[in-house]
Amino acid sequence: MSCPGNKKNISIIRKKFSLAMKRPLSQIQFNINTNRQRHVEGPRPREISIEIQRKTLPINRVKRRLLMEIEKAETVILLGETGCGKTTQIPQYLLERKLNRDGIIGITQPRRVAAVTVANRVAVEMKTSTGQAVGYTVRFEDATSPLTKIKYLTDGMLLREAMSDNLLKAYNFIILDEAHERTIHTDVLFGIVKEAQAKRKSSNCTPLKIIVMSATMDVDHFSKYFNDAPVIYIEGRQYPVEINHAVESQDDYIYSCLVTIFQINREAPPNHDILVFLTGQEEIETMTANIRAIAKDPLFSGPNIKVYPLYAALAASKQLEVFHSPPPNTRKVVLSTNIAETSVTISGIKYVIDSGMVKHRVHHPGTGLDVLKVHSISQAQAWQRAGRAGRESPGFTFRAYTKSEFDCMVKNTVPELLRSNLSNVVLQLLALKVNALTFDFLDKPPKDLILEAFDQLKQLGAIDNFDDAQLTPLGQKMSLFPLDPRFSKVLLEAEKFGCVEEILSIVALLSGESVFVNNIAKREEAAAAREKFSTSAGDHITLLKIFRAYNSINTKHAWCYENFFNSRNLDYAKKVRKQLSDLCRRCDIQIKSCNQDFDKVRKCLISGFFMNMAELQRDKKYLTVGSKQLVHIHPTSVLSGSLPQVVLFTELVQTSKCYMRYLTPIDSLWADEIKSKGPTISGFSQVD
Ligand code: CDP
Ligand code: MG
């Protein structure tokens, strides 16, 4: 294919993009092999029957030997290329051979989307429906039944189950999948499951078998940790992938990715699908809207394009669409977060466009604050992304970064446990009667991080002191909620303020993705619609007002459309709220409403977020209390443009600056109340 800077063919893109972006296209040239590849049309592989697809998976070739090894060993470490069949096939093989001895086979996934889609796929392969022999459990959703023998669940859910049964007796197999992702939950599970296995062995219970799987991991490290467990390698099908780097450094990776999509669309046959790696829902939805707008232009040339977004918060039915064939003569363009790196396999992909970016939460031990941040991926991730183009035939990868930028990337992703706020982990371990300071971690987090978490839990009232590390009755209740401890605290305190109804809604709304639709073309209309609900009482109360209005309307979908709200995310919040209110009832919490007395809600938020406050300085800038970090009000906040003396925030986002998102102004008269909360806010200066 030729260079994306080819000006003759890209006038439409330039025209459309003058709306939002303005850089000359010629800067996005790639180092492209001058030997043009011939593209040959062929049938889409997804049209092959499921039975044949299963039989031709690389894992099927080693099935017998694999099962022999699994039967012999207590723990097995399994390394196999993405798409070779680990996640979907191994549980079925174990069940066919009855190796589970009637116990459940649990397979953990770091992401909800993977647990749901894979369970649905396996149900189809087993000719049953999800929730029967195969099911899934993810936060706020349980699709299992007493018949379920193969259970896909998020790592967080298995950890919750371990809290009520630390021997995990319902399971005879635990498969820890995507081990390389090293999420906090998976890292904790390594230790929990290892201990459950040892305890079951010493007390003559049915043995617990463990399989640790990944497409890319340091097998020696894992093998050593799991008592020198045997390592099995499965060779996958990997075709050559031509890697192209941007010639010059790109200051707008979204723009670069977009231009590249249209360039490929003009050059390649329509059955060659494109997978684009972006960082999150908002970015993906904006690009989806932009692609659709460009493709509608009468001057648009090339095959039709159908866009498929893919991110964790997307409704399950929408997530599944990504596996469907597009209409005839139409190119599938999947816009995904790093979910598509290893967790899900989408057939038909011939081109990968890699933004080089990922979004995750980073904890600053110095300030004690968590920041959601978009930053460079690791080299290991870049290779995984590139590999997605060569699953079925030779493919192409376009990297929106230069070769020297690639060389500067870190080699491997740092485990989440080593860069996160550990208060939730420490709390959950304490609920399991385990002290994080002595826990057998695969890689021990720095002691300072653990101590900081203990400190935060003490301030929240979940523990009394560090030494005996016992949960207080409040701490025990907090551990029952699948929430950040600060949110659990707010929810539990809400009873005293008489605003449990309201806090339930706010916590549910903050548990999912944004309820606002980011429509670039209709930005002003969207802002006007939003204005109707805005209040100077801040973003949390604004969200609450939107949610109340949503619940009182019958024609929800049309109402959301008119007001630029995301009905999927509002509906998700409704489901989350239901689960949380059930948990409250189980904890005997009285669910009362404060009606319009929103001060109660605002004060209640302080009980969990007294560490997340910022104060206006003489120079009109905000510094966080305690840690004195410079922060700004996010432009999407209803408080943007106003200058409250003190604000509370529930999220920090780092883009060009460090922004506070979701803010509530704090009345200066409440300062004393805030001051009495603990040592972290001792830096709070006098508010008058
Ligand atoms: O876990 P691993 O990456 O080794 O592979 P897998 O998830 O078991 O997927 C094996 C094959 O099943 C993939 O190559 C896909 O073709 C197919 N699959 C699918 O069509 N739909 C899904 N939701 C999951 C897998
Ligand atoms: Mg897998």
Image (cartoon, rainbow, N blue to C red):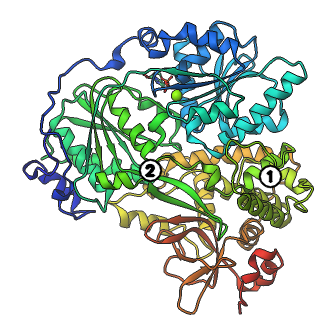
Circle 1 sits in a helix, a strand or a loop, which is it? Answer: loop
| Horizontal side of residue 517 vs 406, given as left or right | right
Q: Mark number for residue 204?
A: none
Q: Nearer the viewer, residue 145 or 629?
A: 629
Disc ID at residue 377: 2
Give the residue at mark 1. 437
Q: 121 above or below 3?
A: above
Give the residue at the far left of this rendering: 8
Q: Which amino acid does the dot numbered 1 rest on? A: Leu
Whether residue 412 is visible here, answered yes or no, is yes
Task: Give whichever of 249, 546 is nearer the camera.
Answer: 249
Type of residue at label 2? Ile
Q: Quadrant of residue 685?
A: bottom right
Q: Is residue 589 visible?
A: no
The residue that appears at 12% across and 39% down in the rendered structure is 34
Picture quarter with the N terminus: top left
